[in-house]
Image (cartoon, grey):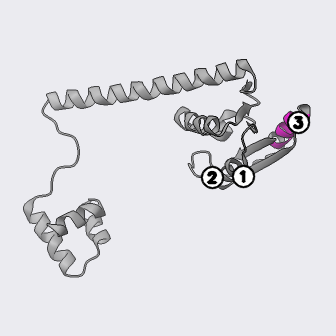
Amino acid sequence: MIIGYARVSTEDQDLTSQIEAIEKYAADRNERVNVFHEKRSGGKEYRVELEKAFDSLREGDTFVVYKLDRLARSTKQLYDIKEKLDKWGVHFASLNDNIDTTTAAGRAMFGMIAVFSEFERNLIQERTKAGLKSARQQGRKGGRPPLKATQKQQIQKLYEGGERAKDIAQEYGIARSTVYKVIKR
């Protein structure tokens, strides 16, 4: 079975061409099709119709999108989705990008995308570590400066006086969990 996913970002955009392309893909393969579609930003990690599409997938199905950017906004997000599909035994096709993991060439193409995604993540990690090391060598520490004893006492008094932890956190520019840590001491 073909499970399709179509998405546009705003209400005034039209889904018709994406849905028709996915339906044609299924018809060309004599497969049944179920297309899930929504009008929601791709930057949102959780998308209702995408989750419904994932829930309907079964081993051997093919998950189809019109274009990769309709599915994911980053290579990491795309890689994570591909890992899920592989785990479920589901094929993947992106029509406009000529990626179809039911074919050897499509699997190779997606594999290359996955390799570059992993490479990109590794480079980011290496740069972050190098930056932190350089900062430490220059005598700088990461993170926020610690609260002074007087600030901790004031936080304690405010909380005991009935102030909400959320309000105290906002006032001091700290996390609510930090307020609770101060109170426990």
Q: Which quarter of the rendering shows the N terminus? A: top right
Give the residue type at disc 2: Arg
Specify the quadrant of the image occupied by residue 101.
Answer: top right
Specify the label residue 109 is tagged with. Answer: none
> Measured along the vertical axis of the image, is residue 156 above or below residue 94?
below
Q: Position of residue 38 (x, y in %)?
A: 72, 52
Q: Where is residue 10 in the image (x, y as percent from the top left)?
A: 69, 51
State the residue at coordinates (29%, 75%).
164
Q: Which quarter of the rendering shows the C terminus? A: bottom left
**Which residue is more in the foreground, 86 or 9?**
86
Q: Name the residue at the left extreme.
A: 149
Mark 1–mark 2 Cα distance, whole angstroms, equals 8 Å
Q: What stretch is highlighted in magenta?
A: 19-27
Residue at the disc numbered 1:
38
The chief SS type of the magenta part is helix
Near mark 3 (Cα within 10 A), the count class, few <14, some 14-19 or many ≥20, is some
Asked if the stretch drawn in magenta spans residue 128, the answer is no
Earlier residue among tags 3 and 1: 3
Residue at the disc numbered 2:
47
Earlier residue among tags 1 and 2: 1
Q: Name the residue at the bottom extreme.
A: 161
Near mark 1 (Cα within 10 A), the count class, few <14, some 14-19 or many ≥20, is some
Q: Where is residue 180 in the image (x, y as percent from the top left)?
A: 24, 66
Residue at the disc numbered 3:
24
